Amino acid sequence: MTGYVSPFDDRARPEQPLADRPPQLCGLRVTLLDIRKNRGAEFLDRIETLLQSAGAVTSRQTKEIFSRPAALDLIDNIARVSDAVVEALAD
Amino acid sequence: MAAEQRSESPPAGPAPALAVTGLAAEPVTIQSLTARGGAMLLFVNEDCPTSALAMRRLGPLCQEWASAGVSCTAVFEDPLEVAIRVARRSGWTGGVVSQAAPYQTSRAYGLLSVPTAVLVDQQGQIADRVTGWDQPAITRLIQRAAAVAGATLATPAPTEPLRKPGCSSKAALDPAIAAAMTHPDEDAMEEMFERGWTDGLPVVPPTEERVEKMLGRHARQTSLGQVPPAMGELTLERLAACAVLAGCRPAYFPVVVAAARAALDSRFNVHGQAVTTQPAGQLVVVNGPVRHELGMNSGMGVLGPGNRANLTIGRALRLMIELTGGGMPGRLDRSTLGQMGKIGFCIAEDEEVSPWPPLHVDRGFAPEQSVVTLIGSDAPLSISDHRSRTPEDLAYVLAWAAASTWSTNWWPLSEPEVYIICPEHAEMFRAHGWTKDRLRDYMFEAVHKPAKDLRRGETTPYVHRSDPDAQIHKWASPAEIILVVAGGEAGRYSAVLGPCTGMGSQIVSAEVEPR
């Protein structure tokens, strides 16, 4: 068997399970994250209206730029103050 | 040397002994294959489409025949690894054996072409033989096999083509030609595809020895950081593997390392470029003495094929993003169309022909430094101008060629846009004493439209906010126009490369450290 050097980072990474889905929206603290894609804010406006009519308490956050991962302190902050988050992709 | 002239042996007489290699440690013999009744040998090779057809048609039936006492064995004229792979892909459920050059077993059976099916009875006598794909004859052979085994055997459904000629048996080829057809790395290259270590083109297998040579004095486990989007750790060993895969010579590795350092600089935002739906590739411009040391092309056909250093350095960077970084098109790379520059896009600047300071000097390096500069870019758009007789006319033509880059009405562009200025165009500006700044300023001033003319389809919020008659320029400033001189000495074709837009991606340069 020929020995090859892999170009991959073959480290095993534990799969991150999805958080439990909330059973209802009423009373939930929902952060709406605008990633600064074109017209993303318009989409979030509509989602926010629907969430509020379902009894959710909404707040808005904004990423620095859509093309980079969100800053860790922004993620931490959202995790601290929210029960759920909606991130808008757009165009 | 002429091929040996032989004629096909008649289907009679004792079956010659087998000189083959199988999967098990025990030798494969006619006696072992006919122990439970009869045996069908199907001589095939990888290169023959008719062999593949025969294996697909007969392969699914082999297990049932074996249960009825007739063994079924594919006798390959290929290495065992190849035989196993081809058999698996064709759904072959029988045995697999391999023979090496000069294909002694094929010669003993008098083969001129493959596939050839040979039926051997329990006494070791050849009972039937079919050459090529011949559905009625194969059905006859199977019926004889059934008679040998005293059982009923399934026959393949009569599907077109009912007959298809075979291909030359490797045993019938001139030995020199046969040897030339068996490249030792051929199967290793196929293995690279199976491992996913490729951009879709054949690659050079990154053996320990090749990676060691590529690394030179570099320490294997030194990390240059994490490669987006999957954040794979980029050790120099992995980067060297990418360089080997790309086809780089070891002498190119310092340039690959510099390009990787530049790509991982957060200002370049390779993360955004790697996953965007845009077609963005990464243009690598090489300046300084290393261009000559590596024999890079800055001249004729600079944006196309022909130069190993240009092509493989750019490809190594792309393989780093695709393999170590996980930015493979169709997976984390979501580019709608992609572009050929995403295979690899590296050029050298023709500093000797240029009337201006080269790109790396513009960016603060000394002329004697070797430097790579990375720019997120779209594919080149060629600009023909053989008629301008003044620098003003030529600058106007060059500038307006960029009007539709990114999008016809998306003005102004706030990202760097590269022009490759060919030597004849550069000479026009040199002859009239135009500096880079003068050309950039003229181009910037030349391209503008009233906002009202840009309000169709995709346009910028800036255009919407502006007075309808306000003049909007194509670029936010002259600094967005990057000028690089390269190309053949004859012909008046320059090019403009649309930008990578909205990524916050800046141009990044890195010095090439000596090997």
Image (tube, rainbow, N blue to C red):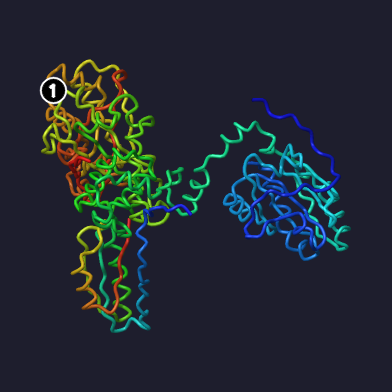
Amino acid type, mark 1 = Trp
* Picture layout, residue B243 above or below residue B285: below
Instruction: Say whether residue B306 is visible.
Output: yes
Q: Residue at x 20, y 44 (%)?
A: B507
Q: Residues within 10 Å of mark 1 (few under 14, many from 20)?
A: some
Residue B288 percent across, percent down from the top left: 19, 32
Residue drawn at 66 percent across, 33 percent down: B173
**Which one is nearer the viewer's eye here, A85 or B18?**
B18
Which chain is mark 1 on? B
What percent of the width, then of the height, locates residue B252?
A: 29, 39
Residue drawn at the location 65% of the way across and 44% of the way down: B77
Find numbered disc 1 in the image and state the secondary structure of the residue it sits on.
loop
Q: Compared with residue B124, is residue B357 higher up or lower down, i.e. above or below?
A: above
The residue pinned by badge 1 equals B434
Above-or-below relation of B289 to B234: above
Figure disc tally? 1
* Horizontal and vertical percent position of residue B417: 23, 38
- Please tell me which residue is depicted at 26% across the width and 24% down the height of the picture: B422
Question: Is B182 on the left or on the right of B114, as rendered?
Answer: left
